[in-house]
């Protein structure tokens, strides 16, 4: 089907009506009639059903197919344009892409949402019901994976040549069910009934070697060549997900690799003789891309995980080199001009020795030339300072799986140690600290050090985080290579996180200031002028109330809990982790409950505390905190003495599509991590953009949010980073707080009783234990009082309706900095040096 550029008269009059606001310059790529015809065509000939038999799932697939026609046409044009112009491109390597649903997003980015909705309506179908049929593409854990998804959206929107590279997990992040208050993990099967967006590209299959041994060959002139004889070869099958930029001009791709058994002979099996035993030694090829590791901010150290990392990096590098050679043959001199590779955390760091292997062993470049190319190609983003999240691999494990890579890592390190010796002669402590190899009882390879040494730029993800990377994590690298360490503050795409998820607020904004804010988010600034305008305040809060009503229905449907939409909707949504301190929120809720029981007239505005969080399946305390939230919720929600003022809701299976429903309804955004622990956060940005007021610590991007909105429009509490360090130096004793604050003592002792878990005393004791005998590593008790006071101030502020509306409007108005378009522009200017490429 071809796309018509004919404007329908109806569209023209609609545009004329809203001409006071900035008018759309683009004409819809498809008219309502064309969409309708295309949906029917696909219902018939792609799905083999008809309008009378079709259920919502069939309608969803047919609608996807109709949109996908346009997507693929623009994808072809984009790829041809990039090829003809031989563009420099960024290659975003990430073990995770948390994409969520694509239909709504793709329709919004083509500006076809209203047309498609109207087309379906004529067919007697509700688009909102159809959208609910789409399973989330949950190929990520949390913030890091969602950042990658926002970044590829911005790259396409800004018409930058870019490819996302990752893993085609058969099972994404587990589906969470709650049984008797506890988390149960169920497999996620996002492709069970087929995924309408992905395209298999068998013509670009790659082979990846694993295991085996390295042979040293001596040339006649004394030269040494290394040859890796792999024990196994795995096939990488690429699946392409088109990434539609806003406006629909550039369509980039996300290329995800699926593993399959290769037809190649398995040499290890042959050599070993013992057929079955040898086979068992090696990880089955098909299992490599089976499942996403569900650990957020924790390094698992498992062999399969390392193989996953190598597998997708090796496939991606081969893919990049194949494309480069098509234009430049065997001339490597322009490689780093054409290719920049961004490593999203250290998960793809094995790419560095892999590129060295290709250049030295296969292309036969000398080491120095190869290293020069390598260190001009890679850039690395650090996402965490948490020691348990810094990747380290046993040298013996790398030796077994990637014997040649371990040799290369040793050579990189050997040459680097000579540089260190030159800078700090005789300083062995310095060498031990900077070495890629940690000489502990078991030799370990530090992937962070490898990444810094092998990259030309290293960035943290928020101003404070980048400062801490420089000062605490890699201070010697900063001394060695001044300027290499930099900051790029994270961002979020306003297309998904405002335009698509909050249509009512978007429409209100369009009417007030025009509709060009989705690609120029600083434009929201002009809403500030209306922050004290009574009419606009009422309109803004009316939208919020409507969003709260919708969420209330969702809560009722999912949990049976009835909530009052006049109450404050207070939302904490993020992975469950001690550093994010959901238990600080919970302990405060218990304190409020206790205050109400002690004093039935306790003065507070009704408040609904809403949680969404998945815990890593092996993280016992995180799962105990989920249990505690649910048990406390059950008690409070059913206690008539308290439930007019207090409700607690845990919405199961937090994911991108549930975030899109919760965020527009939030009055309050809980961002309460221990200062110094949350690298940036992006949930904080999504909520503030939708007019939620943050209660938060001076951590990560909260600091920059506070700078933007001003201290009057945010509730900041708690220890600063420096105060946390001082507390640790001076010796922190959580028992001091337990004995000095009667409320803390009462609440913690309450957790020990069977009040919330009748007949099961001690079911929630592990939380108290971690906060007392466990030393309270995240300073929950130290911050409790300050948190409690901030909550009182917040409660007071909410009662002044006009003041609160003003604050909410100003939060939306001042979020311009946090568009991922700005983050991407920072990467372009500071690191990638990329030019955009207009696609006609
Ligand atoms: C944005 C997002 C996150 C990150 O939230 P933080 O509060 O920054 O940790 C995690 N999961 C999903 C589904 C998200 O959309």
Image (cartoon, helix red, strand yellow):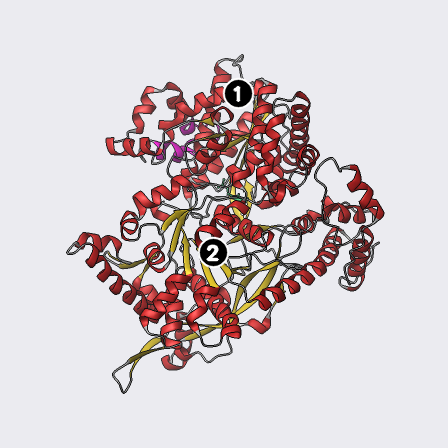
Q: Taking 348 as reference, is 255 left or right?
A: right
> 619 above or below 750?
below
Q: Are the residues flagged by discs 2 and 1 in contact, CB closer than 8 Å? A: no
Q: For residue 806: magenta?
A: no
**Mark 1 or mark 2, which is nearer the start of the sequence?**
1
Between 136 and 217, the one lying in front of the other is 217
Between 342 and 291, the one lying in front of the other is 342
Question: Could you tell me how far apart the alpha carbons at marks 2 and 1 are, in whole angstroms?
Answer: 47 Å
Q: Secondary structure at mark 1?
A: helix
Q: How many marks?
A: 2
Quadrant where the image shows the N terminus: bottom right
Q: Which numbered marker is on residue 470?
A: none
- Residue placed at 44% from the left, 48% from the top? 296
Q: Taking 65 as reference, is 238 left or right?
A: left
Q: Position of residue 607 (x, y in %)?
A: 56, 24
Quadrant where the image shows the C terminus: bottom right
Residue at numbered disc 1: 795
Q: Position of residue 737 (x, y in %)?
A: 33, 24
Q: Position of residue 272 (x, y in %)?
A: 36, 79
Ligand 1 contact, mark 1 (Cβ < 8 Å): no
Q: Nearer the viewer, mark 2 or mark 1?
A: 2
Instruction: Give the magenta-colored segment's residue range.
Output: 750-771
Residue 529 lies in what quarter of the image? top right
> 489 above or below 737?
below
Residue at numbered disc 2: 833
């Amino acid at each position: 089907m071809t796309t018509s550029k004919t404007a329908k008269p109806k569209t023209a009059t609609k545009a004329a009506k809203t001409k006071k606001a900035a008018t759309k310059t683009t004409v819809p790529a498809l008219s309502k009639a064309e969409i309708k015809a295309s949906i029917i065509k696909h219902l018939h000939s792609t799905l083999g059903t008809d309008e009378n038999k079709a259920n919502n799932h069939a309608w969803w697939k047919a609608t996807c197919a109709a949109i996908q026609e346009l997507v693929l046409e623009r994808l072809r044009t984009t790829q041809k344009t990039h090829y003809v112009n031989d563009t420099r491109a960024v290659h975003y390597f990430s073990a995770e892409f948390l994409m969520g649903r694509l239909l709504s997003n793709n329709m919004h980015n083509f500006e076809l949402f209203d047309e498609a909705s109207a087309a379906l309506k004529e067919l007697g179908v509700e688009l909102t019901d159809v959208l609910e049929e789409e399973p989330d593409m949950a190929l990520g854990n949390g913030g890091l994976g969602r950042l990658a998804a926002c970044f590829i959206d911005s790259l396409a929107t800004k018409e930058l040549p870019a490819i996302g590279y990752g893993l085609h997990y058969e099972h994404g992040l587990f589906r969470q069910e709650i049984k008797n208050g506890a988390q149960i993990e169920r497999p996620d099967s996002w492709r069970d009934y087929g995924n309408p967006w992905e395209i298999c590209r068998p013509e670009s299959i790659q082979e990846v070697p694993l295991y085996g041994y390295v042979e040293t060959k001596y040339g006649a002139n004394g030269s040494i060549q290394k040859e890796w004889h792999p024990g196994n070869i795995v096939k990488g099958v690429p699946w392409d997900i088109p990434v539609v930029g806003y406006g629909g001009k550039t369509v980039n791709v996300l290329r995800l690799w699926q593993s399959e058994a290769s037809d190649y002979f398995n040499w290890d099996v042959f050599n070993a003789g013992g057929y079955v035993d040898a086979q068992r030694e090696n990880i089955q090829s098909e299992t490599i891309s089976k499942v996403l590791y569900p650990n957020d901010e924790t390094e698992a150290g498992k062999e399969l995980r390392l193989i996953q990392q190598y597998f997708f990096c090796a496939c991606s590098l081969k893919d990049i080199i194949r494309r480069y050679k098509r234009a430049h043959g065997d001339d490597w001199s322009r490689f780093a001009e054409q290719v920049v590779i961004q490593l999203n955390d250290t998960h793809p760091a094995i790419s560095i020795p892999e590129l060295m292997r290709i250049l030295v062993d296969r292309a036969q470049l000398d080491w120095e030339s190869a290293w020069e190319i390598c260190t001009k190609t890679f850039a690395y983003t650090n996402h965490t300072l948490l020691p348990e999240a810094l990747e380290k691999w046993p040298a013996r494990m790398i030796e077994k799986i990637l014997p040649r890579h371990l040799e290369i890592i040793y050579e990189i390190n050997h040459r680097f140690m000579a540089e260190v010796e030159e800078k700090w002669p005789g300083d062995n402590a310095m060498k031990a600290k900077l070495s890629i190899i940690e000489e502990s009882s078991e030799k370990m390879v530090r992937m962070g050090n490898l990444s810094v040494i092998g990259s030309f730029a290293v960035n943290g993800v928020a101003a404070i985080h980048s400062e801490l990377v420089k000062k605490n994590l890699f201070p010697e690298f900063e001394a060695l290579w001044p300027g290499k360490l930099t900051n790029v503050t994270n961002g979020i795409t306003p297309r998904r996180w405002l335009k698509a998820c909050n249509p009512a607020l978007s429409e209100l904004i369009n009417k007030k200031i025009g509709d060009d804010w989705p690609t120029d988010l600083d434009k929201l600034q002009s809403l500030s002028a209306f922050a004290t305008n009574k009419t606009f305040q009422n309109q803004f809060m009316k939208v919020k109330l409507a969003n709260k009503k919708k969420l209330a229905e969702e809560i009722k449907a999912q949990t049976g809990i009835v909530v009052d939409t006049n109450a404050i909707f207070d939302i904490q949504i993020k992975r469950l982790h001690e550093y994010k301190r959901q238990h600080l929120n919970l302990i405060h809720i218990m304190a409020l409950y206790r205050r109400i029981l002690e004093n039935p007239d306790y003065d507070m505005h009704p408040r609904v505390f809403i949680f969404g969080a998945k815990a890593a399946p092996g993280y016992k305390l995180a799962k105990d905190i989920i249990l505690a939230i649910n048990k406390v919720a059950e008690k409070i929600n059913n206690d008539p003495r308290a439930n007019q003022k207090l409700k607690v809701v845990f919405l199961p299976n937090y994911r991108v599509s549930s975030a899109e429903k919760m965020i527009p309804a939030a009055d309050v955004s809980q961002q309460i991590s221990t200062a110094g622990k949350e690298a940036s956060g992006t949930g904080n940005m999504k909520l503030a953009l939708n007019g939620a007021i943050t209660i938060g610590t001076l951590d990560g991007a909260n600091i920059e949010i506070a700078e933007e909105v001003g201290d009057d429009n945010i509730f900041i509490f708690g220890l600063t980073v420096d105060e946390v360090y001082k507390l640790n130096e001076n010796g922190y004793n959580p028992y001091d707080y337990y004995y000095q604050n009667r409320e803390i003592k009462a609440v913690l002792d309450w957790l020990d009783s069977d009040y919330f878990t009748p007949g099961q005393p001690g079911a929630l004791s592990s939380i108290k234990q971690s906060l007392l005998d466990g030393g309270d590593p995240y300073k929950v008790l130290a911050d409790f009082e300050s948190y409690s006071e901030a909550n009182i101030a917040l409660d007071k502020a909410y009662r002044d309706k006009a003041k609160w509306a003003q604050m909410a409007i100003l939060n939306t108005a001042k979020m311009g900095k946090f568009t991922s378009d700005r983050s991407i522009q920072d990467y372009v200017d500071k690191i990638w040096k990329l030019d955009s490429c207009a696609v006609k």
